Amino acid sequence: MQTTEKVCPWAGNDPLYRSYHDTEWGVPLHDDRRLFELLVLEGMQAGLSWLTILRKRDNFRAAFDQFDPTAVALYDEDRISQLLQNPGIIRNRLKIKAAVANARAFLQVQAEFGSFDRYLWSFVGHQPIVNHWQTLAEIPAKTVLSDRLSRDMQSRGFRFAGSTICYALMQSAGLVWDHLADCSCQPQKGTDA
């Protein structure tokens, strides 16, 4: 992407952050394993910057069996203790235990709906919501829709699934398009990758 193109100010100058902004954030995602990864990483991000998580993403992938929810659902206290010793990830017991609980809830949703993708995207009628924000100040931290998703997910046993985290998940997985109106990125129809 050329430097003369306009991008959302939050993307900054860090190459990793800029690449994430340009190629991932807001792109509709329908792959269950990648959705599970985002769910875990959004929970890990609570109280931290997303750039911190992006810099550790490869470490998370290695530590969490490439975000295979079936494998993560089987983690026991010994495995959690091992993860707490891993300096390459966020070593927070509550967040790690939430990832395990979320893997179990994720598998239950897959069994009930056929896929987590089908469940998650049902909240937006299986079509991205394209917003036209002019400034970063206009972009909400949560919405009535993310409140509804959060309540439903929590009722299904998901942890670290508050409305703000759910809205961040919706943004990152492309359920909502929150690039600023003058950003050079354009809404995409979807991806399976």
Image (spheres, rainbow, N blue to C red):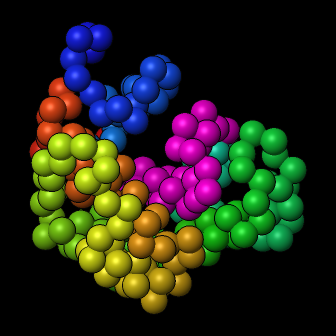
Count the marks: how many? 0
Q: Going by the picture, which residue comes out furthest to the bottom?
A: 155
Where residue 9 appears, as percent x and y from the top left, is 35, 32
Looking at the picture, tell me which residue is in the foreground, 34 or 40: 40
Residue drawn at (75%, 39%), measured in percent from left and top? 88
Query: Dividing the picture into quarters, in which one does residue 193 lie?
Result: top left
The answer, for residue 57, to whether it is visible in the render is no
Query: Dividing the picture into quarters, in which one does residue 75 lie?
Result: bottom right
Query: Dividing the picture into quarters, in which one does residue 93 lie?
Result: bottom right
Range drawn in magenta? 30-59
Q: Is residue 185 left or right of residue 75?
A: left
Q: Is residue 2 left or right of residue 161?
A: left
Residue drawn at (40%, 31%), measured in percent from left and top? 11
Is 98 above or below relative to 92?
below
Looking at the picture, tell me which residue is in the foreground, 14 or 59: 14
Q: Is residue 39 magenta?
A: yes
Residue drawn at (24%, 48%), measured in percent from left and top? 178
Q: Is residue 123 left or right of residue 37?
A: left
Where residue 127 appears, as percent x and y from the top left, is 12, 60
Residue drawn at (15%, 52%), measured in percent from left and top? 131
The answer, for residue 85, to whether it is visible in the render is yes
Is 75 above or below relative to 91?
below
Looking at the picture, tell me which residue is in the foreground, 15 or 33: 15
Q: Is residue 83 magenta?
A: no
Where residue 106 appears, as percent x and y from the top left, is 47, 72
Q: Quadrant of the N terminus?
A: top left
Q: Is residue 59 left or right of residue 168?
A: right
